[in-house]
Image: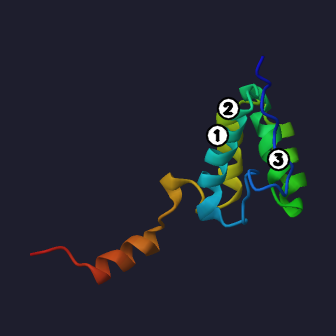
Amino acid sequence: MATRPTLPARKQNRAPTWDKTPATLRQYFEDVTEICKECEVQPNEWPKIAIRYVPASEHDLWTDTLNDLETKSWEKFIKAIYDLYPGSDEDKRYTRLTSKTCLRLHPPSQ
């Protein structure tokens, strides 16, 4: 009988890590999703697992954010966390200034 894999400890190589950079938050959530699926963790527990691996300086903020959610789903948790870190959500990553800079560097062909 096969045993279910266990979640890695915080500092183990398999543990998801996040460097507190908004642009890498999406990858962190993908890594948490992958490890939770591998370890057969129920989706309603995934936010707690994500909090388990964040840097200590973010732990209380993420815990409070989870506690403030009416529905504690993974999707709602991710959205709430993205809202805390400008530039983390792909839909909002590029600002108006970035667009202007791109147009200046690469003007449309006439």
In the picture, the disc for residue 107 is: none
**Where is residue 61 shown, x and y percent of the image?**
85, 53
* Image color mode: rainbow
In the picture, the disc for residue 34 is: 1
**Where is residue 5 shown, x and y percent of the image?**
78, 33
Q: Nearer the viewer, mark 2 or mark 3?
A: 2
Asked whether residue 62 appears in the rendered view, the answer is: no
Identify the residue shown where x is 77% and y is 38%: 47
Q: Are marks 2 and 3 in contact (CB under 8 Å)?
A: no
Compared with residue 65, is residue 19 higher up or lower down, i.e. above or below? below
Asked whether residue 18 appears in the rendered view, the answer is: yes
Identify the residue shown where x is 9% and y is 75%: 110
User: Which type of secondary structure does the marked residue at label 1 adopt?
Assistant: helix
**Where is residue 34 shown, x and y percent of the image?**
64, 40
Q: Are marks 1 and 2 in contact (CB under 8 Å)?
A: yes
Q: Residues within 10 Å of mark 1 (few under 14, many from 20)?
A: few
Q: Nearer the viewer, mark 3 or mark 1?
A: 1
In the displayed structure image, the side of residue 63 where residue 87 appears, left or right:
left
What residue sits right under mark 2 in the picture?
A: 37
Compared with residue 92, is residue 37 higher up or lower down, i.e. above or below? above
Under mark 3, the amino acid is Ile
Q: Earlier in the sequence, mark 2 or mark 3?
A: 2
Under mark 1, the amino acid is Glu
What residue sits right under mark 3 in the picture?
A: 51
